[in-house]
Amino acid sequence: MTYDVGIDIGGTFTDLCAIGAEGGLITAKTPTTHYDLSVGLIRGLKDLGTRAGQDPETFLGNVEALRYSTTIGTNALIERKGPRLGLITTAGFEDTIFIGRSRSWADGMALHEIRDMATIAKPAPLVPPEMVVGLSERMDCHGAAVRPLDHDEVREQLQKLVDQGVQGIVVSLMWSFLNPAHEREVRRIIEEEYPEEFLGSMPVTLASEVSPKAGEYTRTMTALVNAYIHGVMTQELGDLTTNLRRANYRRPLILVHNTGGSKKVSRTRAVLTHNAGPVAGMYGASLIGAQEGHKNIIFADMGGTSFDIGVLAGGTLKAQDFIPVIDRWRTNIPAIEVKSIGAGGGSIAWINTAMGGQLEVGPQSAGSVPGPACYDQGGTYPTVTDADLVLGYINPDNYLGGAMLLDPDASEEVIEEKIAQPLGISTLEAAWRIRRLVDARMGQEMFNEVALKGHNPRKFVVFACGGAGAGHACGFARHIGANTVIVPAMSSVSGAFGASSMEIRQVWEQSRSFRVFNFMDQSHLADCAPLNGLIAELTDKAMRDLKLEGFDEDRIGFTLEFDMRYGSQYHLTRVTAPKLGFDGVADIEALCGLFEQQYAEIYSPEAAFPSGGINIEAVFVTARVHQEPRKLIGAGDNPPRDAVAQATRLACFDPAQGLVETPIHDWSALAPGDTIAGPAIIEAPDTTYVIDPGWSYRMNEFRNGIVTVKAD
Amino acid sequence: MNAFNTIKYSRDPEIVQHLRPEPPSDWEARTMPGLDPLDYEIFTHKMQMIALEGKETTMKLGASTGMRWGDVAFGIYTAQGDLAVCATGIYHHAVLSQLPVKYLIKHLANDPTVGLKEGDSFFYNDPYYGGVHNADMGLCVPVFSEGKLICFIGAAVHTGECGGSEPGGMVNSAKSRYDEGLMSPPIKIGENFELKEDLLGLLANSTRDPRTMVLDIKARLAASRIAERRVHETLAETGADFLVGGLRRILQQTGEAARAKVATLNDGIFRQPRFIDTTGPEAALLKINLVVEKKGDRIKLILHGSSPTLPDRPMNTFFQGLIGMAMVYACGWLFPELPANNGLLEAVDWEFPEGSFINAQGDVPVSYAPATQVAFAQGMFMTGAKMTYATDPSRAVGAWHTGFAVTVFAGYNQWGEPIADITPEINATGAGGRPGADGVDVAGAFFATMSDCGDVETTEAERPFLYTFRNFFNNSYGHGKYRGGSGVGMGLKVHGVPMVAIGSMGFGSHFPATLGIFGGRAAPPAFVQTVRGSNLDGLMAEGRADLPRRLEDLYAPGGTPEEGTRDYLSVAHPPALYEGGDTFYVPVTGGAGYGDPLQRDPDAVAHDVSSGRCSVEAARDIYIVEIDGRTGLADKDGTTARRDAARKARLARAKPYDAFVAEWSKLSPPAEVLRYYGPWDGSAAQEA
């Protein structure tokens, strides 16, 4: 039998998931081997083979597609393991990356980390100042060369970089996204001076090619980050491919992109791999949500130290207008937004004496080391996990499937000392408050994420994954107004599950301004040819690229989107075009109408301003390769049946009633169709479900948990 | 009775005294004590989330530079108009925008010709209530539940044009407030959830950039409506009693926290006179005589002895604007861990003299008030450093640059569309040096901490300029043991249009605006350079490589190849027409120095020299560091010897204190410089 495999390498575990041709699902989890990620990865693949009942070699020979969401690039960036890069930019703008739009000290930081203005700091740059050189050239806002390129100067400045040991060059000139002629000429000269056959040859990255978008800071940073991680990724992925070949995997390795698609390694831009894991998880959520007929999903991955959230509206992954920050750098890649919020099992509870003895949870976290007090690794602060333990939700002897023994006394003591006594309440009450508070904050943050994207959060269901997601979902769903929570069967490997069936897809983008409704004469754009020309250019590029990857033309489909705005606004609203071009002014009018309608829906009809003029500012063509995803085959719909609890444990669902005997179910013993009414606890190998009173659990035919509460 | 029978010009001096929270209403007093602590904590976070959503939405939908790159004060106010919750880094707007709300409660809510009901929206930009200047505009909406007023929601942010006699919102030549453009006290511009098109037309027609005006108003309104919806959703869960009591409790708790925090500081009197070197149209010295008296759990701001009212110059400020600015320092630097709301003012008292330019009255113009206010705020940094050093030295930081060398412009852009605004480099100033670290280079704007300076391409896309450079302005900061952060310098060439009006607003071209602390140096004075009839277009087309790449290149020996009529102007000057190809060079300077430059690590000096951030001359003469010309490294032994000699030379210059005072007291600037100053001998302060 053949398989599609997804791999997601995290900080602690390497997750793997295989979907068989007959719709079966196999998962595996191995410790991540940081010295060489491929060791843990191949070990995990062998594990999968064993679980599939095949010897490793046969299994890998049977794998048809291996899709990998890698963190190699991100790690290289964080650890500053990249090459010594040189930046060639326009004279007069050599400091652009250090100025960082002035507020680069805030990029990649949480709000609470930057409230204290006395301690702000900009990140250490990826390129030192001496490795930045300027060229006396200039394009203007129409793409006209108002200052020509001086070839001798290019050679002089290049020599400066070479003399300082440059290992790779990024060329990012003003307005190059509109007219890349000077950037291309610079590359030609570099290649002429240092042709490929010379050892001194070095990779040259043009910002206009990596990121043909407006905004010189973000465009330059996108190109720099790409160049910075490119070499490390090439090296490590090359080694991995070799190791996979040795292990009998013969097909190309496919990388998951943060844009919501996947591509072969050879056709992947390094910068598009950043944070691809959670995006793969969101993709998995869209598939699992679809099984139950849900299209509007809030993805919530709550781990020990992190909480990633994402918004899936209308059943598909869609890029929104946001500034993706990679490490501390603003970029403008068309990525799917996944937001990390400062919460998790490790979030620390504390008393804010400055605010009159108010209980707070987070944003500080005990992390995984020392971790919560109950880990018994030296943690001395009460955390959410400690509260969960005191409340009886977590089984201290069966945490993470028994992988770690917890010390409930340590949790009791620390909550008693640091929270209960100062507040003059019982330890149980303190634990209850910690949990309620963190659930409320997480729920409120999620509500905002959905609302800020212009959706009604109450129309969404929650997809709860990660080690702690199932334990808190009923709590935070309440604050979103969601009455359904889906907990996937493969809760702790949901990224790998999503990766295993991720479609081939890429976004081709270009900033260019079109006044589709002119403010001054209140007329619609009459000449559609330049706009159609740009759309054709992007679809041609996409077609060429995918054909090079070996896909037939008739399998390739396109979606056209625009970033649009009113008059002099800065913010852009993404609008999907009904067709791939414009046949005349009526189509332009229709697009403006679509923009207005969408704008009014999101921001209220009062906000619309039809006479203010409407611009297109960027064009996006998303190319998809049509493929039938491997379908999971379920066990069929069983009639609902009340599950019988194997045991009971004391747990608290109302501090007034204290600890009460609560039914404990073994997830492995449950069968599709089984239902459980809260209060109840379900122990799965990788997570614990807490079903609050009023909520009820049902296992669906794919063993996913559907937890619902009656709507008010 | 008609509301205005008793108020001159719709300005009510009683209202502007209401900066601190009102006494709890009966409803608040009844509901506040019974709040469940856990539910209350969940509620406060929810309110914060609502404010955050409102702020982000406002900024998304607005169009002016303030909206694009700036900072919005988005707040939830109690039914009495107190700001309870806000999301912003522009704290002064947040604190001040309660005044328009309190005004409309007092004067309009019960006026039969206006009234207050669900679906209404109110606009305002009279600086008397907004506290700053006409370009700062706000909008608020009331929130009702079952017919009862529960709270207000509002957004305040700078819209770059308000139809004054000069474009760009800041009128250098203003002789009275009637030169400063649109001046709307709170007026109802919408009813039944709809804006009134006639009033919108009036507002749009009052400015040079009607499109941006309308988009900004709609942005404030849309965000307020979304927040209103969220408050209703919360009401459905908590009930009105909880919400009303909860908002009040936030204020009370903040006030208590602020007083407790102030109580931890040492008592004392901290003085920091602040000097401004312009009245707007002409150079002259003005004084803000700031004295901060810290006693127990209160801080008192005493301003006696400040310069007199400027009857026909725009540098006047309303006193409430200064209180707002004090909150910028409090929220960002002094108490960053406390919520930002006007409960903080429970720890603050103030005493402002009558007849002073820092306590504007009547018809005097105020459109340069932001300059006066930031000068005052820098005084807060400096007194704050003295006040906190002994108890929490991490708070004792040097002042950031004022931010005020702002370029204003107006005309038609390269697309033929009307424009009038400021450039975003107001948000590109350097931060002050601080204990243990230099100030951040180009950190932003201290009074709008969530703002940034944007991309040059974004400005060029819609404005008729081509930046000839925008790089660090080296040596633009105060030197010190920890130096201030560098600012930026930029060159603007008028591009793609026949002409455009450009001017500049600020201070500090004659007397340093940003002074150092604890022996650190001031950031240097800076001025604007312009070239009319410039040949720069031709030089660029020729591909000349020797054109300036940064501001200091303009002043290099031998000059630049650019020719034309060159002028050196104060950063405060009115807009004038510039033709296509003319150039305008702008300095945005850096932060204050911290500590004696002789204590700076020589390696840090060498590093600054090699990166260009510090000149060889400054290294040699100010830091007394010798740099090896070949290696670029500091000569440590040589440096130690030269620094020892410099210290000895200082001692040789020293005088007994009495002798110094006797000599120093005789000195005075020329009378011309002091013509707006008031008594030079300090008698005004002593009398008070």
Image: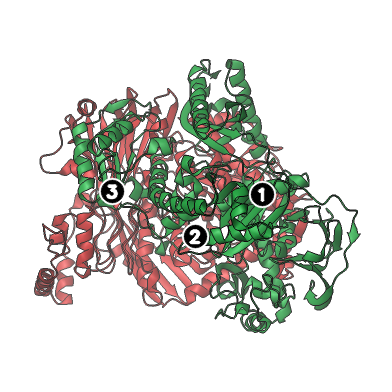
Chain colours: A green, B red
Frontmost residue, A318 versus A361: A318
Q: Earlier in the sequence, mark 2 or mark 1?
A: 2
Percent coordinates x, y for residue B303 in the rendering: 38, 62
Q: Residue A37 shows which numbered tag?
A: 2
Amino acid residing under circle 2: Leu
Position of residue A292 in the picture relative to residue A407 (left or right): right
Using a 10 Å C-alpha cutoff, classify the residue at mark 3 as few (fewer than 14 neighbours), some (14 to 19) or many (20 or more): many
Whether residue B615 is visible, yes or no, is: yes
**Mark 1 highlights which residue?**
A284
Percent coordinates x, y for residue A677 in the rendering: 86, 63
Amino acid residing under circle 1: Gly
Mark 2 → mark 1, Cα distance in angstroms? 23 Å
- Secondary structure beneath label 1: helix
Mark 2 → mark 3, Cα distance in angstroms? 42 Å
**Could you tell me which residue is drawn at 45 percent across and 40 percent down?**
B65
**Could you tell me which residue is drawn at 84 percent across and 49 percent down?**
A636
Q: Residue B472 shows which numbered tag?
A: 3
Amino acid residing under circle 3: Phe
Labels 2, 3: one chain: no
